[in-house]
Image: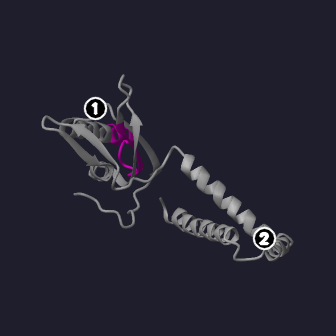
Amino acid sequence: MNVINRIILFFYALAFGAVSLLVIALYTRIFSDAQVWNEFLYLCSRWETLAVAIVVLICSLYLWLQSISSHSNEVTANEAVIVQGKMGQVRISLMALKNMADKIAVSTAGVRDVKVRIKMTKAATKDKTLIPSFKLRLVVSETYNIVTISDDIRYRLNDYLSKYIGIENTKIEIDVKSISDNPSEGKRHIV
């Protein structure tokens, strides 16, 4: 969950907490019915009440859409691939796989910059197990063949996943977002 969603959820929870306290106060008859009704009518006649209601509705719709969204580009540290070994299961975090894919792509000749996204998808097998799916966005050099770079990255990544982790037939999508020989800012290169 990103920072904006956490902030919205924080204020949303505070608002519902305040409404819960109000309902408790009304149920215990701390305030008289006439006083509550008078204040309610006053609040309903104010434009500020309508503005707050619209903001709460927008926040509700936003959080609802986020909750039903099926795609998330963020990889969290607790997400993992479970691989069955001879002595039991092994959990390999998606962050570790993401870092490994990043290192493989950056070490490929002609790759200037890379952004890796990873998510779990259902395999094409009968048991529909979840396997990692990679999406790499590359900035490549002008002097290298893009198809060769792409094939090299796919081959090395598939080889690593099958040989060292035991994951077969992984989907690897490569997008070239730029062709440039300008040095990338703040990105490491493996020599």
Q: Which stretch did the figure color magenta?
A: 131-151
Q: Tell me the number on the disc at residue 159.
A: none
Q: Which residue is mark 1?
A: 168
In terms of depth relative to the viewer, which is nearer, 13 or 164? 13
Which residue shows up at 30% across the image and 53% down it?
99
Q: What's under tag 1, amino acid-wise?
A: Glu
Front-most of residues 191 and 169: 169
Could you tell me which quadrant the C terminus lies in? Answer: bottom left
Q: How is the image coloured?
A: one colour
Q: How many marks?
A: 2
Is residue 108 in view? no
Q: Amino acid at mark 2?
A: Thr
Left or right: 187 in relation to 11: left
**In the rendered view, would you say 52 is above or below 115?**
below
Question: Is disc 1 surrounded by few (<14), some (14 to 19) or many (20+) residues within 10 Å?
Answer: some
For residue 23, side relative to residue 48 (left or right): left
Query: Which is more toward the observer, 135 or 77?
Result: 77
Report helix, strand or loop for mark 1.
loop
Q: Secondary structure at mark 2?
A: helix
Going 34% across and 35% down the picture, which residue do you hit? 170
- Residue 73 lies, in percent from the top left, at 46, 51
Asked if residue 177 lies in the magenta stretch, the reply is no
The residue identified by callout 2 is: 49
Q: Position of residue 127 (x, y in %)?
A: 35, 25
> Which mark lies nearer to you, 2 or 1?
2
Tell me if mark 2 has few (under 14), some (14-19) or many (20+) residues whose alpha carbon lies within 10 angstroms of its own: few
Above or below for 181 versus 81: below
Left or right of 77: which side holds 176?
A: right
Residue 133 x, y percent position in the rendering: 38, 40
Decide which of tag 2 and tag 1 comes sooner along the chain.
2
- Distance from label 2 to label 1 (Cα)? 57 Å
